[in-house]
Amino acid sequence: MSRRSVKSVLILFLAFAAIFGVSRIGDISTIYRSSDSTSLPPETLLEDGHSGGAGDPKEEVLDQEFSNELLGGISAELPGQAIRDVMRSKTSLLPYLEQYQQRAASGYADAQYLFASILEYCAPLEEQFSGESLSSLMSRMSLQDPKYIAWLNDSFQMCHELIERGVGSFGDSEYFRMSSYEQDFPLALVDEATQLASNFAKSEEIVPLLERAISSADPASMFESGIIAFDLLEDNPEKALGLIIAACSVGVDCSYSGPMMSDACRFNENCSLGESFVEFVIRDSQVSPSTVEKAQIDANRLISAMRNNEPIDFRFSAAK
């Protein structure tokens, strides 16, 4: 079976390592972020015909505008997808730091992970462009790739207020990241697994991190775990595909116009108009019908467990 599609998407998540762990990467030219944050309900392969996705009212666990409602003086909990959406917002990230500052200082892993993600995203911009206006920056970068220019413009809008105040004044990003990881925050576990994968670590080191992340039932973490696992589990792709299908059914926008397809098509020219992310992976990776059927069975179990708030005990039994 061809691994072209998933290899391409794994590259995408190694790029996410640059976005959400940039202090360990350091090269600003490698940092790419999707410019498409459309939120249309994803079309998936559920046997019951339910399309699921971001438009499912049962899965809208956070107000779409990241409600500023306080619970006992502490901002409400941020699920993984909300954090990923913040990092696609193309608006100033400073209000999110201010809103969740007390929650992060109080030791909540979700807010600490958000802090680490924002600070690590903006730090290299501060190092290279501090004190420079957007017009000057655009003029100086005019000969660069247009996609890079678009990303740079968005990133300037997201980070310029933090840069003016000093990114480091908001705290130590490594402290926040390690604290969230030590508390088993699922996206922090996935990021560590991604970092290990980029360093060609053995699957025995990576798989336990993914399994811990999946057990949280966080759709964003489940999706990203599936992407990484798809490349690791050459002999058992149905487990990874099942994770992707499940995540796309309960919160991750995998629709043809959503951010997952936008990112995938950036690295793979074999995209087809009107195709969902799940359909794209199945077609481009030449996944067999029997594998899809097994993946769907796994996905349905995961979806049922998440919707019924049941524990998830997921194991990559065929991990090498």
Image (cartoon, helix red, strand yellow):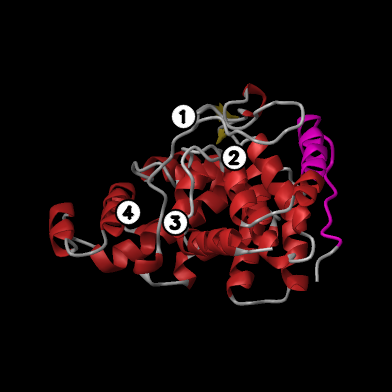
Neighbour class for label 4 at 10 Å: few (<14), some, many (≥20)?
Answer: some
**Residue type at numbered disc 2:** Val
**Residue type at numbered disc 4:** Trp
Magenta stretch?
296-317
| Quadrant of the rendered image containing residue 305 | top right
Neighbour class for label 3 at 10 Å: few (<14), some, many (≥20)?
Answer: few
Tag 4's secondary structure? helix
Answer whether residue 146 is magenta in the image: no
The circle on residue 269 is 3
| Quadrant of the rendered image containing residue 193 | bottom right
Q: Which residue is mark 4?
A: 151
Tag 2's secondary structure? loop
Instruction: Name the residue located 50 percent from the left edge and 38 percent from the top edge.
Output: 256
Q: Earlier in the sequence, mark 3 or mark 1?
A: 1
**Residue type at numbered disc 1:** Glu
The circle on residue 252 is 2
